[in-house]
Image (cartoon, rainbow, N blue to C red):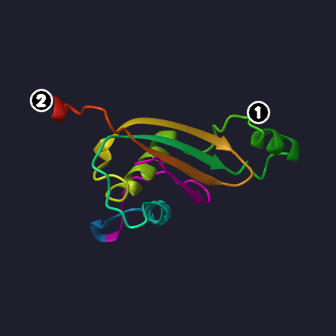
Amino acid sequence: MTSIRIIVPGQPIPKARPRLGKHGHVYTPSNTVAYEAAVGYYARQAMKGEQPYDCPFEVNLRFIFDPPASWSKTKQRQAVEGLVDCTVSSDIDNLIKAALDSANHIIYTDDRKVVKVTASKDYGPKAQTIIEFIPRIGKITKAEAA
């Protein structure tokens, strides 16, 4: 089993908290639902019909954002070149949550199987999310050690 890499085009969207609508109805905001559906779609494509894996995973995530249009062309270029840290966009923990939840039951049987996460937020020429799922085969799990 090799690593699974997916690229989700478009602006990364963080996991938003459920909202309380009219008459006490709780809902997830539509942009979160759409982003999670997109990640799920690309994860299914990468799995090519295989069942989710039931092993520990390491996950590397790179969230790439468009530089703000209000910035000068010089600052936008510097941002794309990696000279400006991406601090104005979403909280990284909520971005991670949206991505990992979206791969649940598609890449892995349960997101509890994720044992290591590395993530970054960057500016780039094209907004996208790049996710690499790395199975940790050969490691002894707590259940196997008992």
Q: Residue at x 78, y 50 (%)?
A: 70
Give the residue drawn at x 57%, y 52%: 129
Residue sitting at 52 percent across and 38 percent down?
119
Disc sitting over residue 111 in the figure: none
Q: Residue 30 vs residue 8: left or right? A: left
Verify CB contact (< 8 Å) between mark 1 and mark 2: no
Where in the figure is residue 68, as x and y percent of width and height? Answer: 73, 49
**In magenta segment, residue 80:** no
**In the rendered view of the protein, which quadrant contains the C terminus?**
top left
Q: As drawn, is 61 to the left or to the right of 10?
A: left
Q: Quadrant of residue 136?
A: top left
Question: Which residue is farthest top?
Answer: 145
Q: Is residue 75 left or right of residue 135?
A: right
Q: Which residues are magenta?
A: 1-22
Separation of marks 1 and 2 at Cα, in angstroms: 48 Å
Dot 2, crowdedness within 10 Å: few (<14), some or many (≥20)?
Answer: few
Q: Position of residue 127 (x, y in %)?
A: 66, 54
Identify the mark at residue 146; answer none if there is no mark: 2
Q: Amino acid at mark 1?
A: Leu
**Three-letter residue code for mark 2:** Ala
**Looking at the image, is 18 positioned above or below residue 72?**
below
Q: Nearer the viewer, residue 23 or 98?
A: 98
Work out whether 69 lies above or below 51. Answer: above
Q: Is residue 40 above or below residue 112?
A: below
Horizontal side of residue 36 vs 53, given as left or right: right
Q: Residue at x 39, y 62 (%)?
A: 28
What residue sits right under mark 1 in the picture? 83
Residue 17 covered by magenta stretch: yes
Question: Callout 1 environment at 10 Å: few (<14), some (14 to 19), or many (20+)?
Answer: few
Q: Earlier in the sequence, mark 1 or mark 2?
A: 1
